[in-house]
Amino acid sequence: MNNTRRTFFFALAAGGSMLSTVAKSQAKLDEKDPQALALGYFADAAKTDTKKFPKYAAGQVCTNCALYQGKASDAWGGCPLFAGKQVAGKGWCNAWAKKG
C-alpha cells in the first residue's frame, strides 16, 4: 500500500472516531428547552400529558421513533429536531413517527 492510500485510511479512521466522540459529548436535551416545550418533549414518555398530547400512545418512545439517531439500546441519542442535543431513549415528543 502506498503512503497516500495509507494516509487516507488513517485519516478516515481518525475522523470516524472523532465523530463518535463528538456525538457522545453532546448536551442532553432539557424538558424546559424552548424547542422541547414547543414539541411536547418528555424525557420519560410515561409522564407525557395525554390530555395536552392525545397523539401519545403507550409504548411510543424515542428509541422506536423514525427520527431517533441512536441504537435501540442507547439511553441517549441524537434527533434532527433538536440539533446539537441528545434526547432520552425513553423520551417522547409530539413529532414521534413509527420507525419503518
Image: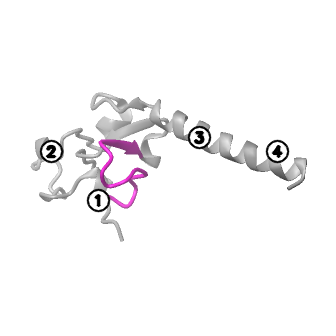
For marks 4 and 3, give the CA distance: 16 Å
Q: Which residues are magenta?
A: 65-78
Residue 48: numbered disc: 2
Q: Is residue 74 magenta?
A: yes
Q: Amino acid at mark 3?
A: Ser
Q: To which residue does mark 1 refer?
A: 64
Residue 29, compared with residue 81, is above or below; it is above
Residue in view at x 40 percent, y 50 percent = 70
Q: Amino acid at mark 4?
A: Thr
Q: Secondary structure at mark 4?
A: helix
Total label count?
Answer: 4
In the drawing, does residue 1 fall left or right of residue 42?
right
Check whether the beta carbons of the residues at disc 2 and disc 3 lie within 8 A of each other.
no
For marks 2 and 4, give the CA distance: 50 Å
Q: Residue 32 at x, y = what percent?
A: 28, 28
Residue 7: numbered disc: 4
